[in-house]
């Protein structure tokens, strides 16, 4: 099995779910996930989609935020709704995922926003995601949505049953998502990580060290070790707009994440304009050097 680090697009097309996970694990902490915002239907470099820009700057996986499964659309992808994701994958040659959001019952620390049905973590949307051509689903929450860990666990159980044989299931919160009881270093605990694993998560998400108040390097490392003990992969995430911070800050976060032992590195969608290509490349160079960064950037999708 090739490391994802070395995979061509033709390799990815032949892989089943378990082979993709094995390829990620074999890359030894050098897999980059770029999240892309669809909130404002914007394009950083029109007429290109932001997905194409992210692929050009070294992303291995692309994650769509605020994608509406009932109304499939990505700015810069001119295709019929049912072909949008297939076309995006043809343009980028990357594995593509979608955020779905399980709203819970936690007390809110901020105003709660109403969420379109097509973004909610329902079985219907999970099945639509599979049909549309997504490779993975991330169960998480945007600011003010009220997503909590109990709701994520219940959604995981249902989705594992419905699409778990075909789609990689990722789960976890990058920030409080409005929940008062799951803010700061209460965002996740050992019992919840165990519950995520038992419910069918293949990859468990944690905030990157230094991104959420009180979430330190030591805290994240302890959680990553526990995730690996459960035979699952870990994903550290920048979901606090620090994806738009200085390159020096990005390098610090990247190296701390690498030292925790994480398998995948997520960069959020809140850079000015939706993403920061230069910070994506900076992060990539920090965790895997220029050799692998430039190789990923230059590798033809026709290989």
Image (cartoon, helix red, strand yellow):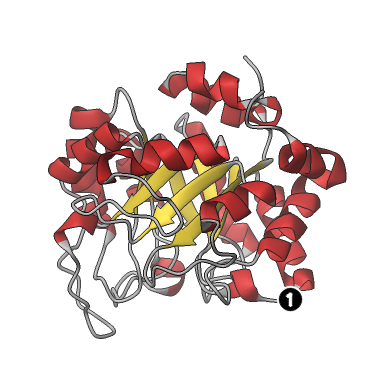
> Which residue occupies 41% across, 44% down?
97
**Quadrant where the image shows the C terminus:** top right
Q: Is residue 32 above or below residue 184?
A: above
**Quadrant where the image shows the N terminus:** top right
Quadrant housing residue 282: bottom right
Image mark count: 1
Residue 270 is situated, as x and y percent measured from the top left of the image, at: 51, 71
Q: Is residue 23 above or below residue 286?
A: above
Q: Is residue 82 left or right of residue 215?
A: left
> Which residue occupies 24% across, 30% down?
163
The crowd level at tag 1 (other Cα within 10 Å; few <14, some 14-19, many 20+) is few
Toward the viewer: 138 or 84? 84
Residue 44 is situated, as x and y percent measured from the top left of the image, at: 57, 67
Residue 76 is situated, as x and y percent measured from the top left of the image, at: 46, 56
Tell me if residue 14 can be seen. Answer: yes
Toward the viewer: 69 or 292? 69
Secondary structure beneath label 1: loop
Toward the viewer: 206 or 80? 80
Quadrant housing residue 283: bottom right
Residue that numbered label 1 is attached to: 246
Quadrant housing residue 253: bottom right
Toward the viewer: 92 or 3? 92
Q: Is residue 128 above or below residue 222?
A: above
Tell me if residue 169 can be seen. Answer: no
Q: Is residue 223 left or right of residue 25?
A: left
Residue 91 is situated, as x and y percent measured from the top left of the image, at: 53, 40
């Amino acid at each position: 099995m090739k490391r994802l680090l070395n995979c061509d697009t033709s390799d990815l097309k032949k892989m089943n779910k378990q082979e993709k996970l094995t390829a990620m694990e074999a890359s030894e902490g050098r897999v980059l996930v770029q999240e892309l915002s669809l909130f404002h239907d914007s394009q950083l470099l029109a007429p290109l989609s932001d997905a194409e820009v992210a692929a050009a700057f070294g992303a291995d996986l692309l994650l769509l935020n605020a994608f509406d499964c009932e109304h499939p659309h990505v700015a810069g992808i001119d295709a019929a709704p049912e072909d949008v994701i297939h076309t995006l994958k043809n343009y980028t040659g990357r594995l593509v995922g979608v955020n779905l959001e399980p709203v819970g019952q936690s007390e809110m620390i901020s105003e709660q926003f109403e969420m379109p049905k097509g973004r909610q973590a329902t079985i219907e949307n999970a099945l639509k995601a599979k049909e549309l051509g997504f490779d993975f689903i991330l169960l998480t929450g945007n600011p003010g949505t009220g997503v909590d860990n109990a709701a994520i666990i219940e959604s995981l159980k249902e989705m594992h049953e419905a699409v778990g044989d075909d789609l990689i299931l990722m789960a976890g919160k990058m920030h409080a998502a409005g929940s008062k009881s799951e803010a700061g270093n209460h965002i996740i605990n050992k019992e919840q990580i165990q519950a995520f694993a038992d419910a069918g998560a293949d990859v468990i998400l944690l905030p990157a060290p230094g991104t959420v108040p009180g979430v330190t390097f030591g805290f994240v490392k302890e959680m990553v070790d526990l995730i690996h003990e459960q035979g699952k992969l870990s994903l550290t995430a920048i979901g606090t707009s620090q994806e738009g911070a200085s390159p020096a800050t990005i390098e610090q976060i990247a190296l701390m994440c690498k030292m925790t032992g994480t398998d995948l590195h997520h960069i959020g969608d809140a850079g000015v304009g939706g993403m920061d290509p230069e910070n994506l490349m900076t992060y990539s160079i920090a965790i895997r050097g220029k050799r692998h960064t430039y190789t990923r950037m230059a590798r033809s999708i026709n290989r």
